[in-house]
Structures are given as C-alpha cells and as structure tokens.
Image (cartoon, grey):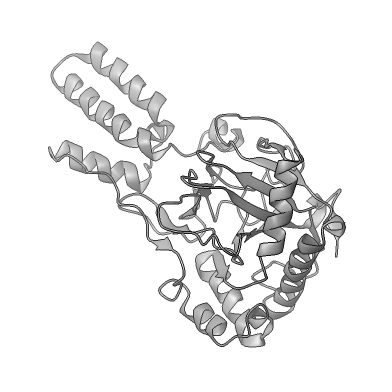
C-alpha cells in the first residue's frame, strides 16, 4: 500500500448522483482506448476520476462494480432503489427492540435489563439502534423553536479530519443546518432528555461493556447540540469520527452519537416530509481497507432511512461503522438534540457524568 494512501485524510464517498456519470465516462474511456484513440480515452478516464475518486483505487466499492457490469454489458442502469424508510414500524429491523418497546411503559421501557441487552445487541450487529418513545418531545420542540425565533441558532460548521471534537472549520456545500451548543442546565426540557441519555449510556456500560469499549476507559459527554433543518436543508454523507474502532491519526474521540428528535404534538412526520437520516453500510478505512464487518455490496450501500419521529432516539457509532447523511427537508422544519459520548485521552474539554 502506498504511503500516500496511508497518510491521506479520509475522503467523502462520491455522492450517488455522480456515480453513474462517472462510470459512464469510465466505460467510454475503455471503448476509446480499445478503438485506438488513446489520447481521447485518457482524457475521459481523467474526467471519470474527477467525478468519482474511488475509480482510481485498486479495489472498487460495490456500487462501482455493479454499475460497470451493467454499462459494459449494454444495459442502462435505472439507479439503486431508495432504502426502506423506518417510520413507526421497526420490527423488521430490530425485532427484539420493537418487542421491548411494545411491552412499555412509554418513556421508561429501555431501562429494563432485557431492553438494554437488545440495545447492546443492535449496536454490536448493526452498529446503530432506534429507541422509540424514549422521552417526551413536545416541550423540547417548543424550546428549540423559540431559540430559532430568537436568533440563538447559527450556521453549522464541519470539523475537518483530525481537528478534534470541537473544531469549527467550514465546508459550506456539505451542510446547511443551524445549530447551538446548549448547557442542558439552562433548558429544563433538554436537561430531562440529556439526563435520560446519560442514564442509558451508564446502564449500557454496565450491561454491554465490550460493545461500548468501556473496560476501564473514561467516558465523557460533549455539550449537547441543538440543530434545525428548514425546508431544503441537508447534511451530506459523512462520519462523525474519522477512524475505525476509535483508532487512527484522525480520530477525534467520539465513540457514540445520540440523536433525539423533537416534534410538536400536532405535527406528526409523514412520508414526503423529508429530513430522514440515511444510514449506510460501514465505510472502508482508507489506511487499512477494512470495513469493520461490512459485507461487500452489489449496488448502493444505503441501509435505511430513519424518519425523524418525535420522541425517537437514534444511537450509532460515530466512526466509519456508520456513514450517514441528513436528507433534504421537504416540508416544515426538523429539530433534534445531539450528544456525543467520547472515550479515552481524546475526551478533553468535555463534561463527564
């Protein structure tokens, strides 16, 4: 493996909309070279590489292999279908978690030992877990909406690889939401939700220490972030931590991401509203090529679209195990409160609990 690949920062995977044009250009380049037009073919190859950097790798991702096979055979790909949307029913994805939630009580079901086992198993097997009816959402939604009206939320920024958990470099094209870092002691509804998150993490550490890598390591929490996505807002595909299993030169210490969705009581999310969080299969580590248990994919690597239902908590590993994006909001606005739990020496400048 080249030293350039070993030391280069992770690159964002090519957006779905650019993949087919890139492979089409690549196949055209092959045809030009086969026909003896080497110079034109090289230019077309370079165009393909500009659209999709992965085409320069020795081992292509599954989406590239699948599209190339279809185009090379003369078929016209229709594009990968949208992944299934996780609205109210989560039984097909997390049957044990769904059964535990159905057993109730609302807002407290996740405290049972059997429910904690189900959460730990979901994180171990799928790298993310959905906990519906985790906490009341309407009061926190009202507080977030008031903060937005008062101008307390500001354009979000994106940390570059290796900048640490609180860096504020800006890549304007990748996200368009507005955020605020909030002391939970200042907002009673947020204090309640974050308190429940902290309790859940404490219980999970005891119930599934291997899953949370909690054997002797300190664990801390960053100050919660409140975010608002208005109509048209999005956050392009990314990982919250640029490493695998908490190791690597660009690791920022984030171990687990916890996203709680707020919603007004009379404003239930509906199909077509947008704002779902799309979860992808594990991303290859550019230093090793490992996908941390991810299977080779014959097409697009999206797993599911998680609807932003009020009261829903989404837990997922912050590193390359869970690439994700926030799809554009199509109606109304989407508020969420996010906490990151950090482990090890990188957990600096944060509050422990």
Observer-nearest residue: 92 or 165? 92
Q: How far across and down, in percent of the image, does residue 346 sit?
A: 79, 50
Q: How far across and down, in percent of the image, does residue 30 sit?
A: 21, 26
In which quadrant of the rendered view does residue 215 lie? Answer: bottom right
Observer-nearest residue: 84 or 64? 84
Give the left or right position of residue 210, taking residue 80 as reference. Answer: right
Observer-nearest residue: 53 or 324? 324
In which quadrant of the rendered view does residue 139 lie? Answer: bottom right
Observer-nearest residue: 67 or 288? 67
Query: Which image quarter is the C terminus in?
Result: bottom right
Residue at image location 74% in from the left, 69% down from the top: 214
The vertical placement of 195 against 269, above or below, is: below
Give the left or right position of residue 160, taking residue 61 as reference. Answer: right
Q: How far across and down, in percent of the image, does residue 209 sit?
A: 70, 74
Question: From where the camera sits, is residue 242 visible?
Answer: no
Give the left or right position of residue 102, taking residue 66 as reference. Answer: right
- Furthest-front residue in view? 266
Question: From where the camera sits, is residue 122 visible?
Answer: yes
Residue at image location 60% in from the left, 65% down from the top: 265
Q: How far across and down, in percent of the image, does residue 184 sit?
A: 82, 57
Residue at image location 68% in from the left, 49% down from the top: 145
């Amino acid at each position: 493996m080249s030293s350039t690949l070993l030391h280069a920062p992770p690159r964002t995977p090519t957006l779905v909309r650019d993949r087919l044009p890139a492979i089409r250009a690549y196949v055209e380049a092959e045809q030009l070279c086969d026909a003896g037009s080497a110079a034109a073919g090289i230019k077309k190859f370079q165009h393909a590489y500009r659209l999709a950097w992965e085409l320069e790798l020795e081992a292509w991702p599954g989406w590239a292999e699948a599209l190339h096979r279809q185009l090379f055979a003369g078929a016209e790909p229709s594009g990968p279908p949208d992944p299934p949307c996780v609205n109210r029913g989560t039984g097909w994805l997390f049957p044990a978690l769904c059964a535990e939630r159905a057993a109730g009580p609302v807002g407290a079901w996740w405290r049972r030992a059997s429910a904690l086992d189900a959460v730990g198993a979901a994180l171990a097997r799928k790298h993310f877990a959905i906990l519906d009816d985790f906490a009341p959402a309407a009061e926190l939604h009202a507080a977030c909406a008031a903060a937005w009206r008062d101008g307390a939320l500001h354009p979000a920024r994106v940390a570059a690889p290796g900048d640490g958990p609180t860096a504020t470099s800006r890549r304007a094209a990748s996200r368009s939401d507005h955020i605020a870092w909030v002391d939970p002691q200042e907002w009673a509804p947020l204090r309640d939700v974050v308190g429940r998150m902290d309790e859940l993490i404490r219980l999970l550490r005891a119930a599934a220490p291997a899953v949370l890598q909690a054997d002797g390591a300190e664990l801390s929490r960053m100050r919660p972030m409140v975010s608002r996505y208005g109509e048209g807002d999005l956050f392009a595909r990314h990982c919250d931590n640029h490493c695998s299993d908490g190791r690597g030169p660009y690791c920022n210490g984030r171990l687990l991401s916890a996203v709680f969705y707020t919603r007004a009581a009379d404003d239930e999310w509906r199909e077509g509203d947008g704002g779902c969080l799309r979860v992808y299969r594990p991303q290859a580590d550019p230093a090793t090529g490992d996908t941390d248990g991810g299977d080779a994919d014959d097409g697009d690597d999206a797993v599911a679209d998680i609807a932003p239902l009020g009261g829903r908590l989404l837990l997922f590993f912050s590193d390359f195990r869970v690439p994700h994006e926030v799809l554009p909001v199509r109606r109304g606005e989407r508020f969420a409160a996010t906490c990151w739990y950090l482990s090890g020496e990188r957990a600096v400048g944060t509050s422990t609990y």
